[in-house]
Amino acid sequence: MSKADDLFIAMCKDIIENGYDTKGEKVRPKWEDGTSAYTIKRFGVVNRYNLAEEFPAITLRKTYIKSAIDELLWIWQKKSNNVHDLHSHIWDAWADEDGSIGKAYGYQLGVKHKYKEGMMDQVDRVIYDLKNNPYSRRIMTNIYVHQDLSEMNLYPCAYSVTFNVTGNKLNAILNQRSQDVLAANNWNVVQYAALVYMMAQVTGFEPGELVHVIADAHIYDRHIPIVEELISRPTYPAPKVTLNPDVKDFYDFTVDDFTIEDYQTGPQIKNIPIAV
Ligand SMILES: Nc1nc(=O)c2c([nH]1)NC[C@@H]1CN(c3ccc(C(=O)N[C@@H](CCC(=O)O)C(=O)O)cc3)CN21
Ligand SMILES: O=c1ccn([C@H]2C[C@H](O)[C@@H](COP(=O)(O)O)O2)c(=O)[nH]1
């Protein structure tokens, strides 16, 4: 069975059994019908995925790995903040009439900053350091930019990645301030696992560990019965996910360079309600 399933099931059980119920509190998100979207939450969840061992996709239900990678490339490679550059519709509810989500995610990764070596954006800085200073402890991105928050339609949730090399392995910590566990936990895990795979390949390392640090890990009230059923299902071995070895430049990757094999899963849960 997939280790990612074990971690997902343990996290959900911990939230449901030991979490805090926000019912009645002043909460921001709403359901489509206008009612408040309450959660059961757990503060400070840390999950470690060994990418050398398996690609961390859950098998309880299918994670749309290619759509998740498409969104990751939208942010990290296209550095776009416009939903028209995305192939899924998951961000439509937060876009304005022109399709922009404001100065969030891809916008921030595209901003150039002044370094001793010249002007670079945060993604190019990571690639530069992994190639030139791989043992540096200063290789990180951060898109939680306070001066621009007023121009973001949703504040970044997965906001910082720290890359760290151990021997020939590239590791990463994903810092996330808020996580909708049913809709996006495995979605985000698969995205940043794919990012480590890509960064490792173009900078000459092997994928190591992904550590996912979540401040507020929550299950929305309308998701609780769905999660209870989901985590009672059988699990299967993790899928095999491989990258086209010919790609040597981060900016040349497309979703077609990822091959997913043997991804056996439980049935899909259709129309998961998303709190906006
Ligand atoms: N409440 C909430 N949860 C989120 O996960 C979330 C937000 N808001 N706001 C911004 C983005 C958008 N994200 C989303 C939104 C929808 C899905 C979703 O509907 N996922 C479906 C499959 C989508 C597809 O067809 O590709 C799923 O079954 O998981 C996933 C992530 C993640 N983020
Ligand atoms: O990549 C993402 C983006 C968003 N989310 C979730 C986490 C929360 O449920 C909402 C954002 O609401 P806030 O009130 O701004 O925390 O979106 C996610 O899990 N992953």
Image (cartoon, rainbow, N blue to C red):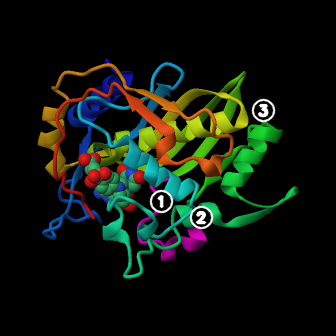
Spot occupied by residue 95 in the image (x, y as percentages of width and height):
38, 73
In front: 152, or 236? 236
Q: Amino acid at mark 2?
A: Gln
Q: Which residue is mark 2?
A: 108
Instruction: Answer few, some or many: residues within 10 Å of disc 2's Cα (few below 14, many 20 plus, some between 14 and 19).
Output: many
The disc, 3 or 1, on the residue closer to the chain's N-terminal end is: 3
In front: 117, or 151? 117
- From the Cβ of disc 1, is ligand 2 less than 8 Å away? yes
Asked if labels 2 and 1 touch by Cβ distance under 8 angstroms, the answer is yes
Instruction: Answer few, some or many: residues within 10 Å of disc 1's Cα (few below 14, many 20 plus, some between 14 and 19).
Output: some
Q: Which residues are magenta?
A: 145-158
Q: Is residue 4 left or right of residue 159?
A: left
Is residue 192 something one can see in this rendering? no
In the displayed structure, 90 sits above or below 48; it is: below
Instruction: Answer few, some or many: residues within 10 Å of disc 3's Cα (few below 14, many 20 plus, some between 14 and 19).
Output: some
Q: Which residue is mark 3?
A: 135
In front: 105, or 195? 195
Q: Nearer the viewer, mark 1 or mark 2?
A: 2
The stretch drawn in magenta includes residue 94: no
What label sits on residue 121 in the rendered view?
A: none
Asked if labels 3 and 2 touch by Cβ distance under 8 angstroms, the answer is no
Quarter of the rendering occupied by the C terminus: bottom left
Q: Which residue is mark 1?
A: 156
The disc, 2 or 3, on the residue closer to the chain's N-terminal end is: 2
The disc, 1 or 2, on the residue closer to the chain's N-terminal end is: 2
